[in-house]
Image (spheres, rainbow, N blue to C red):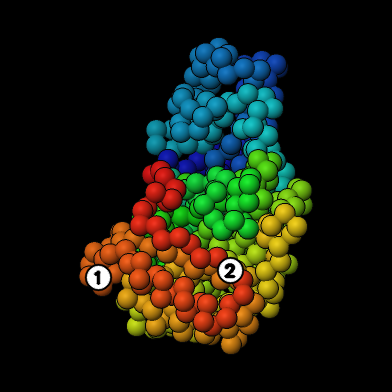
């Protein structure tokens, strides 16, 4: 074997076409390892050099399963004698990493993990998936090529971006293809950023995984959603609007939160169902519509039965919403503006009123008027929220008129008085205050005069106390 067939400088990413000799390199090294460290360990060839046809960094990755990680001290010296340098966990809890090579060039990586631990299973499951699923393997090949071109001199970023693919593929291999392709040029919402979310961030600053700040049972929603056992609320980070008064601005605008894969999101939904929440309430879901769609399908396969609530800002495309048909049970849009000028000024959104009208019509087409069960809990349908802003009587009236004329007076409305100035509202004197009782009462009267039969009117509260406590 030609020694130059393997080996790569440590910091760079340079991929080689697949070589049959990589298997021979592995077998040769396995024999050396067995002779040196014994036959009690399990040894497997992992990584892309173990997958026929895959492009790979020409470094042989070897997984060694031992009974307990406490034994690692017994292996360091024999591994040194074979030319390996011990690097500790090297950023991966539950793994001990060894590198073999010549100065700056590595030829072999050895990962010691506990036999049959999550680390062990995850490596083998992904290798076997790539060996057996042609489509996943092809998509991984394409992704690696693109990543290597972009991050040729930044191996940590190359590795991080690949891990998104691995996480999603392991949890729901069949869905990775859709998510991968649809996020390649993102047009999920009306912003149509057309950026590749595997590498770049668009207006919503969101990547491939969903980002979540908090999930919990919430008792502050409308009574038909919160009921006695709470609404299973998931607060997504980031947003496709830029509202200057956002009451959740720490997560929507500052992006507080942590990333989760589609499979993990499905598990969160199941956990909320397990806690006896009445429903799954997805707050600000629009920019993660594809990932959420896949998570709902996966969670339903695993036994999710309670209704899904789509709690959004209505700045959404009909094409995207139509992909949720049959998956979302209750639509809960906040119809924010009837004036283009206000939408642009306070939410940085072009054409909001027309877009929201179309989105709400599509929601109504899918689920119809709200249906409530014998226990007073919503099971399906549309409930439109209106957050009343200061100095905004005309817009509220126009929105309510449009709803009455387009969808009917039996439409469920939730009139919300909870506005208080926060985030950047102080830059806009006209909205830099809470509602006055008279102002809110006028809005309630409009609702009554127009003859709406169903809905909720929030009591006037001038306090941020109801807002969940988000953590950074
Ligand atoms: S979801 Fe995000 S990246 Fe995609 S179009 Fe909307 S704002 Fe842009």
Q: Is residue 287 above or below residue 261?
A: below
Q: Is residue 31 above or below residue 312?
A: above
* CB contact under 8 Å: marks 2 and 1: no
Residue at 68% in and 34% down: 121
Looking at the rendering, in which quadrant would you find the N terminus?
A: top right
Assess disc 1: are there few (<14), some (14-19) or many (≥20) residues with their C-alpha within 10 Å of its C-alpha: some
Residue at 48% in and 62% down: 458
Look at mark 2 in the image and give the residue it sits on. Answer: 455
Residue at 64% in and 32% down: 118
Q: Is residue 192 above or below residue 330?
A: below
Q: Label 2 vs label 1: CA separation? A: 31 Å
Q: Residue furthest bottom?
A: 405
Q: Residue 419: x, y in percent?
A: 38, 63
**Residue 161 appearing in the image:** no
Which residue is at the front of the view, 172 or 6? 172
For residue 428, the mark is 1
Q: Residue 214: x, y in percent?
A: 50, 46
Which residue is at the front of the view, 134 or 409? 409
Residue at 42% in and 45% down: 469
């Amino acid at each position: 074997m030609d020694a130059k067939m393997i080996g790569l400088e440590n910091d760079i990413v340079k991929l080689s076409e697949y070589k049959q000799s990589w298997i021979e390199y592995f077998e040769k090294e396995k024999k050396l390892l067995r002779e040196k460290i014994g036959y009690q360990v399990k040894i497997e060839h992992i990584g892309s050099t173990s997958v026929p046809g895959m492009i790979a960094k020409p470094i042989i990755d070897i997984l060694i399963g031992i009974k307990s990680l406490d034994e690692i001290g017994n292996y360091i010296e024999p591994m040194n004698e074979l030319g390996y340098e011990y690097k500790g966990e090297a950023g991966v809890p539950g793994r001990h990493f060894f590198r073999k090579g010549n100065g700056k060039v590595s030829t072999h990586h050895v990962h010691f993990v506990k036999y049959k631990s999550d680390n062990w299973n995850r490596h083998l499951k992904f290798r076997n998936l790539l060996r057996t699923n042609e489509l996943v393997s092809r998509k991984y090949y394409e992704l690696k090529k693109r990543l290597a071109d972009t991050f040729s001199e930044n191996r940590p970023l190359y590795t991080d971006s690949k891990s998104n693919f691995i996480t999603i593929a392991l949890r729901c291999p069949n869905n990775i293809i859709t998510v991968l392709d649809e996020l390649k040029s993102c047009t999920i919402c009306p912003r149509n950023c057309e950026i590749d979310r595997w590498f770049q961030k668009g207006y919503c600053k969101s990547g491939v995984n969903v980002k979540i700040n908090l999930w919990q049972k919430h008792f502050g929603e409308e009574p038909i959603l919160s009921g006695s056992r709470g609404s299973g609320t998931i607060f997504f980070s980031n947003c496709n609007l830029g509202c200057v008064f956002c009451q959740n601005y720490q997560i929507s605008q500052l992006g507080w939160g942590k990333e989760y894969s589609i499979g993990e999101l499905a598990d969160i939904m199941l956990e909320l169902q397990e806690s006896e929440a009445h429903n799954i309430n997805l707050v600000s879901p629009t920019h993660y519509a594809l990932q959420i769609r896949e998570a709902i399908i996966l969670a339903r396969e695993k036994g999710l039965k309670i209704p899904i609530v789509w709690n959004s800002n209505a700045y959404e495309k009909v094409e995207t919403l139509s992909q949720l048909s049959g998956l979302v049970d209750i639509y809960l849009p906040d119809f924010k503006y009837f004036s283009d000028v206000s939408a642009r000024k306070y939410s940085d959104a072009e054409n909001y009123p027309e877009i929201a009208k179309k989105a709400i019509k599509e929601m109504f087409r899918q689920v119809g008027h709200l249906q409530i069960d014998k226990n007073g809990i919503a099971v399906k349908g549309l409930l439109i929220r209106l957050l009343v802003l200061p100095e905004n009587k005309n817009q509220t009236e126009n929105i309510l008129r449009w709803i009455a004329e387009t969808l009917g007076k039996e439409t469920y409305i939730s009139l919300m008085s909870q506005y208080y100035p926060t985030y950047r509202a102080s830059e806009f004197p006209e909205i830099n205050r809470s509602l006055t009782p008279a102002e809110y009462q006028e809005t309630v009267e409009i609702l009554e005069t127009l003859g709406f039969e169903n809905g909720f009117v929030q009591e006037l509260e001038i306090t941020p106390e109801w807002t969940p406590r988000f953590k950074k």
